[in-house]
Image (tube, helix red, strand yellow):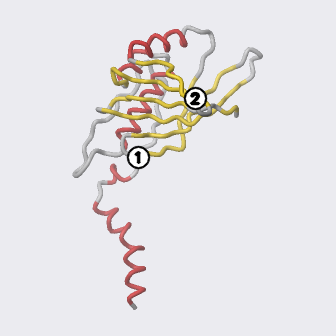
Amino acid sequence: MRALAVISFFLLTPFVMAGCIDPADQVPPMKHQAETSKPATPQLEQSRSTKVMRLPKAIVSAHVDAFNEGDVAGMSKMQHPNIEWLNISGSTMTVQASGRAALAKNMQDYFNTSTRVTGTLRDWSLNGDFVSVTETVRWKGADGKAKSQSALTIYQLEENLIRRVWYYPSVEN
């Protein structure tokens, strides 16, 4: 009988607790945004007891939305003044850019090339100030064929801004 009570506790607790949490706070919303010229602004909401889990996801999503639009100023709004963009390759880590101004210059140079690249994010994982995603970029190659590659990317947030980005080796899809 005691085992039945313990099993019932573990099976029913999630359903009881779900009734106590505002439905908007239970699951991060999926972002479906029409093509616009401005990136979405992250929602700075508070739940009853803690920051809403979707805030880190909204910040990273808004950053990628701005990237997709080639909007350097929009990307900069999501970045900490001392942002560091780091590339990982094997046991080597290379600083791609350090500081908001340096990253903005790199991004502007990147957007000035003729290749149009867009990114999407999947496989989200949140752990404190860290957000890990699989980032997939797509473009048309010189031969006109669609190309894509994916990489593990980890974002560190500080003061609700992107402080560091670790970009791991990409894999062609």
Task: Mark 2 vs mark 1: give the one in front.
Answer: 2
Q: Nearer the viewer, residue 28 or 172?
A: 172
Q: Which residue is mark 2?
A: 92
Say whether residue 88 is left or right of residue 15. right
Say whether residue 48 is left or right of residue 149. left
| Quadrant in the picture for residue 63 | top left
Label 2 and label 1: CA atoms lie apart by: 24 Å
Q: How many C-alpha atoms fall within 10 Å of the one at disc 1: few (<14), some, or many (≥20)?
A: few
Q: How many C-alpha atoms fall within 10 Å of the one at disc 2: few (<14), some, or many (≥20)?
A: few
Q: Determine whether 74 is above or below 31 in the image.
A: above
Say whether residue 29 is left or right of residue 94. left
Amino acid type at circle 2 is: Thr
User: Residue at (46%, 30%) from the top-left corner?
Assistant: 165
Specify the quadrant that holds the C terminus: top right
Q: Nearer the viewer, residue 169 or 133?
A: 169
Q: Nearer the viewer, residue 64 or 102?
A: 102
Amino acid type at circle 1 is: Asn
User: Residue at (44%, 40%) from the top-left corner?
Assistant: 131
Disc 1 element: strand
User: Residue at (56%, 37%) from the top-left corner?
Assistant: 152
Q: Which residue is mark 1?
A: 127
User: Residue at (49%, 13%) from the top-left corner?
Assistant: 106
Specify the quadrant that holds the N terminus: bottom left
Residue 120 on image: x %, y %: 55, 32
Whichever of callouts 2 and 1 sits on the residue coming sooner in the sequence is 2
Q: Residue furthest front?
A: 91
Q: Residue furthest bottom?
A: 1
Residue 40 on image: x %, y %: 39, 28
